[in-house]
Amino acid sequence: MNKKTSIILTVLLLVCIAAMAQRTTQINDTVQKRIKQVEENLAGTVQTTDQKPWTIQERMAYYKVNGVTVAVIKNYKLQWAKGYGWADVSKRVPVTERTLFQAASLSKSLNAVGVLKLVQDGKLDPEKDINQYLKSWKLPYDSVAKGKIINIKHLLSHTGGINVSGFGGYNINDTIPMVVQILNGTKPANSARVRCIAAPGTKYTYSGGGVTISQLILTDITRQPYDQFMYQHVF
């Protein structure tokens, strides 16, 4: 390689590096603007013309929330994630994008994906009686159901007339109950027995109990541990 060619290649390389650096800066600037939009423009369910938007910090203070993580997905890719507040207030440990939070009801939509995978594969009819698929436990129908069956559509849409809206959870040293114990409301479960409280299909009643039944249906059909099936077919 002669000296002239070497100089030309060096110049081209520097131009490429400069272009990449400029593009990266532009992308970062764009993302930063979007982050700011989220941080400073929170609105309520009902919006009025004279209502000022809230910041994340203002909403956290209002609801007495110590820490929050926000993650934004665009085109199936993580665009940005950021933590706010404290993971441990007493120790002044800040929340970061890697701080772990309990998934809680966010898991309901992912559970639905797993259940609908069985529908897609022809292993589950979403309109049939759920007791046709339950093996390790059966829903005890009573007069409240008014002779109507409960199906998967009811469970996933919270229209099955099932009780137990949510669960309190368990401490790290507690004995964790099996799913059937939770459904029966027997120790070590710390929640009420899951049962019918209204006729299916008549009204919306948010029900973690109904979602738990759908979880058991999945494991009874596949005969796989729930976490294994979800990891293989959803995650």
Image (spheres, rainbow, N blue to C red):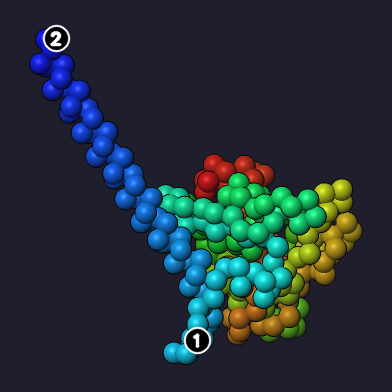
Is residue 67 shown above or below 10?
below
Q: How many marks?
A: 2
Q: Nearer the viewer, residue 151 or 59?
A: 59
Find numbered disc 2 in the image and state the secondary structure of the residue it sits on.
loop
Judging by the rendered image, the residue that carries numbered circle 1 is 51
- Give the percent coordinates (x, y) of residue 197: 73, 80
**Residue 107 sits in which quadrant?**
bottom right
Give, as a three-letter code, the residue at label 1: Gln
Find numbered disc 1 in the image and state the secondary structure of the residue it sits on.
loop
Is residue 51 shown above or below 112?
below
**Residue 9 sits in which quadrant?**
top left
In this view of the protein, can residue 147 be seen by the observer?
no
Residue with the most extreme top position: 1
Judging by the rendered image, the residue that carries numbered circle 2 is 1
Is residue 141 shown above or below 96?
below
What residue sits 61% from the left and 58% below the top?
84
What residue sits 11% from the left and 10% below the top?
2
